[in-house]
Amino acid sequence: MPDRIDRLRAKLAGEKVDAFLVLRPENRFYLSGFTGTAGALLVTPREVFFLADFRYVEQARSQCTRCQVVMFKDSLHELLRENLPRWGVFRLGCEGDYLTYKQFATFREKLEGITLVPLYGIVEDLRQAKEEAELDIISRAVSIADLAFNHIMGLLKPGITEWDVALELEFFMRRHGASKNAFETIVASGPRGAMPHGVASHRVIQPGDLVTMDFGCQYQGYHSDITRTVAVGRSPDAHQREIYNLVLSAQRAALAAVRAGVKACDVDRAAREVIEGAGYGDNFGHSTGHGVGLAVHEEPSVSKKNENPLEPGMVITIEPGVYISGWGGVRIEDMVVVEEGGCRVLTGAPKDTLLICPC
């Protein structure tokens, strides 16, 4: 944690603030190790304060061993109003991309004499390149999702509902160490596969359906995110194989483009050109990927708009897809670590051919 605080202070040095207030849960955890649901971190050039109410003081003292824990009785605003001048803070940086307008206005009203300075992406930028310890935890989260996919392949068959599949995936991941789902599980079968975010419904899976499953878990605060599309009940037809192989080719092209120094938009372009070349460009309407870590969707965005270069240690998804209204869709998603000469694929679930269930 000290190195993270030092790096934060280095970023703040040019921002003309006396301190930085951290409220976003992921940022708070990243800088302090605090896992509770309420509290604030105040970072000054020389001190780190963790500000908590009675409910979380003991937890903060246990987890935030490098912070001065300060309890407030009535409100965070009152504690800040009384102490910021004493701590030499008159220009207070805050998370401009996290606070709502109402929250910002309340802080401004309550902290008379203090200038609030909205800052953007300060901690989020630090979080993009993962440390080795973070990569180890993320790898475990990915392995739990891989195990869940292998498990569901033995149960997926015509006659069960998408809801049944989602519940089984979620229960399995929790039984194997996950603290919770990474997001609401997507299970989209048959024509529902045309919805990129088609969360599980009570639709009964039919013979011949393609089923897209997008799921993941949280493990020790970090996330996994995987998508696989499989055929159910009988061998896929020629069109199903065509679309699957097209998406797989697009994903492989993007994976081959990933390496440190390459712009994120160039990775997106590698996948998009394959799909556009086959005439399905209009059926691929989302970005190719995103960062994963303490949030399941975080920077960097692997999109045509992001011209920033990838850096070693970044963890991103590569997830092209094709979606056809009235027919269905295919998406294939892996998580990878950006390295100097390429990328290391973390996801191990099979994908090289369109799998048929039951196996």
Image (cartoon, rainbow, N blue to C red):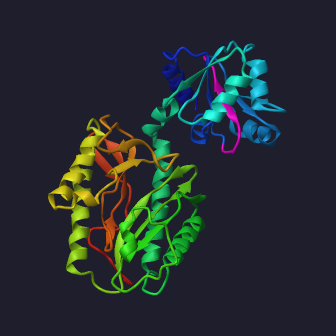
**Is 43 contained in the magenta span?**
yes
Which residue is at the front of the view, 198 or 312?
198
Q: Where does residue 217 sit, x and y in percent of width and height?
A: 52, 59
Is residue 305 depicted above or below 243 in this figure? above
The range drawn in magenta is 35-45
> Magenta region's main secondary structure?
loop
Q: Residue at x 16, y 62 (%)?
A: 278
Is residue 282 depicted above or below 107 in this figure? below
Q: From the viewer's perspective, is 169 left or right of 42?
A: left
Is residue 28 depicted above or below 83 in this figure? below
Quarter holding residue 38: top right
Q: Residue at x 73, y 31 (%)?
A: 51
Q: Is residue 211 visible?
A: no
Q: From the viewer's perspective, is 176 left or right of 121?
A: right
Q: Quadrant of the N terminus?
A: top right
Q: From the viewer's perspective, is 166 left or right of 279?
A: right
Q: Quadrant of the C terminus?
A: bottom left
Which residue is at the front of the view, 66 or 186?
186
Which residue is at the front of the view, 10 or 215?
215
Is residue 276 depicted above or below 300 in this figure? below
Q: From the viewer's perspective, is 50 left or right of 216?
A: right
Quarter holding residue 73: top right
